[in-house]
Image (spheres, rainbow, N blue to C red):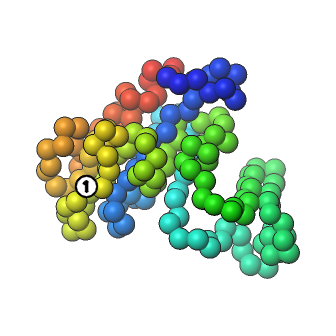
Amino acid sequence: MTEDPDNNNQAATPVLTVIGKSKSGKTTLLEKLIKELSGRGYRLATVKRHAHPGFEIDVPGKDSWRFAQAGSQQVIIASPDKFAAYRKLDQELSLDEIVAGIKGADLILAEGYKQANKPSLEVLRAANSAELIGSPEQRIALVSDLRLEVGVPHFEFDDIQGIVGLIEKHFLLSRK
């Protein structure tokens, strides 16, 4: 495990990317994995890569949106039960830069980021494409309705228990 210098010599939070072509089932798979892992008591953080610039996370007309429109480079919204912050960027942050600010999670799940050089679950749906897009060196498992021999465990889309078992073995049980 790598050491995290900003976290009092605690091991860095592991990051697992879920990659695949558009419409392959990444988001649906992540929802199921999050539900199962959090049900087992793990604290999760998630990162979703949005490939196109210009998404909005605040509702036009609301105070925080108005602050950003007026020129605030960083906007923070805080309530008794939630905290959210966003800032304008001059360039896209790497996954490492993003996860450096995440604290208190047992595992970080990231959708996308195939070039992040992180362990990945690759998702492949026959109706969408039969082409793998990830690095074989980073792939820890394939989730697919196709049977491909790629040298890593293969899971069907509905085998959430099996996938979570693999995630626990690779990332979580050794941290306890």
Q: Residue at x 67, y 42 (%)?
A: 101
Q: Residues within 10 Å of mark 1 (few under 14, many from 20)?
A: some
Residue at image mark 1: 132
Measuring from the top left, give residue 41's x and y in whole percent: 53, 34
Q: From what the image shows, is residue 36 above or below residue 91? A: above
Q: Residue at x 80, y 70 (%)?
A: 68
Measuring from the top left, give residue 73's x and y in whole percent: 80, 63
Q: Residue 88 falls in which quadrant of the image?
A: bottom right
**Closer to the camera in the image, 117 or 8:** 117
- Image position of 50 (left or right of 83): left
- Image position of 105 (left or right of 16): right
Q: Residue 90 falls in which quadrant of the image?
A: bottom right
| Residue type, label 1 | Leu
Residue closest to the far bottom: 61
Q: Residue at x 36, y 66 (%)?
A: 22
Q: Residue 16 falls in which quadrant of the image?
A: top left
Q: From what the image shows, is residue 166 above or below residue 20? A: above
Measuring from the top left, give residue 96's x and y in whole percent: 57, 43
Q: Secondary structure at mark 1?
A: loop
Residue 63 shows in the view: no
